[in-house]
Image (cartoon, rainbow, N blue to C red):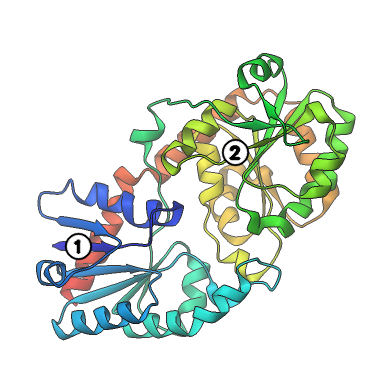
Amino acid sequence: MRVFFYRESVNACSYYRCILPHKYLSRDPEITSKISDSLTEQDIEESDIFIFQKKHSSNDFALLNKIKAFGKKIVYEIDDNIFDVPIWNPSYAAINQIKAKIKYFIEKVDLVTVTCKHLRKELLRFNKNIAVLPNSLDFEKIDRGETIKPQILNKNLQQVDWEELKGKLKGKIIIGWSGSPTHKEDLKIVTKPLLRLLSQNKNIVLFMVLGAIKELVIRSPEDQIFCVGAVKLEDYYALLRTLNWDIGLAPLDFSNFNNSKSNLKILEYMSLGIIPVATKIENYANTLEIRFNNLLINANNKSLWFDKINELSQSNLTVLRDKVISFTKENYDIKNNIELWKSTYRKLLES
């Protein structure tokens, strides 16, 4: 089997959906796997199955038709419900301009791969052949124990010396959130609970990676909130390990778009022993409710968020840390889960 991952430029999506599967497929002597953000005629001749990740340009249409003319198989990889983006999302206008093009691709390919059951259900109207390939983690990298010197800013956006701050954090309860600026509506869910927690418990410190909302930063005590600068993709786990959070926040506003999201954020937290507190959307619930149901918040009820985070902040989390790490390794290690990719692609080639 000869596989070609025609990926997006390097970002978190391409890392989990293309780069990691490529890495582990390449270890199978019966599989040849290649990966690139460009695709040549020679590549088309030398491969059997092509994974197009979120492609939609005119050139990509031409490549799709050329591959079809060779009688080879095409997979379309997509990890978001771009057909139901909320109007408040900063990407709303840009995505609206490409929805029709992506729909065309989904309709024309042999197989669509997605991250979760809800997204599969949403896309079945365009293509009946959709497979769920859940996000998995690379514990070979995670278990290296790498750390990094983070860029830390205080609420006034002034640089903070990490070594000095690290000493002050000993004995504190560290709460963190990580995500892009597209999550402002989601962060509104936890803003008031967090402000209440910080005011009532001076032993709590909050870290916001990549994004925050103005009200939270302005109203938080200066020595209890810090913003963290972006790092290279390959340094993300080293950053989380360095910051050494006790609790990781995963609030999501209730919407069809968010219900189509994967469980990746909480998996990243749990792989490092960070205890997630998450909105009970479908895919967070599917991950947590059997063994960690008490970490799910049933609604956007601010008092429930406060109660759960407050309870965890006053608990000994050592045993729970070990449990979430073990659970994530047992169920979401790409080394084991790569068999699902293999069987899915083989089945397509045999059809």
Could you tell which of marks 1 and 2 lies nearer the N-terminus? 1
Residue 145 as seen in the image, left or right of residue 197: left
| Residue at disc 1, secondary structure | strand
Q: In which quadrant of the rendered image does the C terminus lie?
A: bottom left
Task: Calculate the distance from the C-alpha at mark 1 to the C-alpha at mark 2.
Answer: 36 Å
Q: Tell me if residue 306 can be seen.
A: no
Residue 295 or residue 199, whichever sits in front: 199
Residue 101 or residue 138, whichever sits in front: 101
* Amino acid at circle 1: Val
Q: Tell me if residue 241 can be seen.
A: yes
Which x, y percent locates residue 65? 24, 85
Asked whether disc 1 touches disc 2, contact meaning CB atoms under 8 Å apart, the reply is no
Q: Residue at x 77, y 27 (%)?
A: 204
* Amino acid at circle 2: Gly
Q: In which quadrant of the rendered image does the N terminus lie?
A: bottom left
Q: Is residue 351 above or below residue 321?
A: below
